[in-house]
Amino acid sequence: MQGMQLRRRTTAAILAAVALSTALVAGCSKSNQQSTANLPDAATLLKQSAQTTRDLKSAHLELTVQGKIEHLALKTLTGDLVNSPAVAAKGHTKITLGGDDAEADFIVLDGTLYGSLDPGTWTDFGPASNIYDVSTILNPNTGLANILSNFTNPKAVGRETINGVQTVKITGQVNADAVNKIAPKVATGGNVPGTVWIREDGNHDLVQAKLEPSSGNSIQMTLSKWNEPVTIEKPPGV
């Protein structure tokens, strides 16, 4: 019984760390730099992308943390997020816990969080909001759209192709409150340096975002498969 309780607490800690970070990143995207001639206005592009992101129904997320960020044990996360017709998510994460790496699968469905440290073995952790509300990621008021809406001193600095998508790279500062709404306690001071890569054509999708709460320590997120159908089902045995 004690072993089961310890395992449950360990899994909960992993998923709590996951949740604390599901808001932001990816690190293994392929990119190349291009011409900086005739770049679009940064503020206008941010506004357009914020509206597109606010309307997102689903997206695939790749997240990576570089360096060490207090309150954030996450190292990587890969997942699919759905905001409509209901909030749901599924994916896999790796975190550092007690100096060791640990991995877990997770599913959020109908407001309930399920986690698995071992293939095929799932635990019901009850309301996801007790650990982390995944809706903050695509939430139109507090999620990534809010990050884009809270950029200050934005500057378009170049073009890059990321995973086959031509983007405009924009740098600036992000309001600390907006950062903490998507990843609590990450921003402990003032504004946070931020960089976003926005699709230059079409609906101006948010392709990638990077936040640097402290020098050399960053959270980077890459989005893809915008609004593509995603099926998320309750895991077996729970």
Image (cartoon, rainbow, N blue to C red):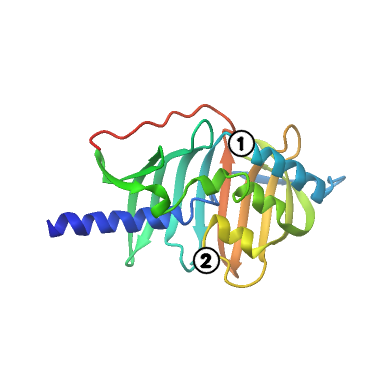
Q: Quadrant of the N terminus?
A: bottom left
Residue 204 position within the rendered picture, expressed as x and y whole percent measured from the top left: 72, 38
User: Nearest the camera: 71 or 28?
Assistant: 71
Instruction: Report the residue that reaches farthest toward the left.
Output: 1
| Structural crowding at the residue carrying mark 2, measured as other residues with C-alpha within 10 Å and reported as few (<14), some (14–19) or many (≥20) | some
Amino acid type, label 2: Lys
Residue in the image at 80% along x and 50% along y: 43
Q: Can residue 29 be spotted in the picture?
A: no
Q: CA distance from mark 1 to mark 2?
A: 25 Å
Q: Can residue 117 be spotted in the picture?
A: yes
User: Nearest the camera: 133 or 36?
Assistant: 133
Residue 38 position within the rendered picture, expressed as x and y whole percent measured from the top left: 87, 45
User: Nearest the camera: 28 or 48?
Assistant: 48
- Disc number at residue 56? 1
Label 1: which secondary element: loop
Q: How many marks?
A: 2
Amino acid type, label 1: Leu
Residue 164 position within the rendered picture, expressed as x and y whole percent measured from the top left: 64, 35
**Label 2: which residue?**
185
| Structural crowding at the residue carrying mark 1, measured as other residues with C-alpha within 10 Å and reported as few (<14), some (14–19) or many (≥20) | many
- Disc number at residue 140? none
Residue in the image at 63% along x and 48% along y: 141
Label 2: which secondary element: loop
Q: Which image quarter: residue 234?
A: top left
Along the horizontal axis of the image, is 87 left or right of 3? right
Mark 1 and mark 2 lie on one chain; the one further toward the N terminus is 1
Along the horizontal axis of the image, is 98 left or right of 223? left
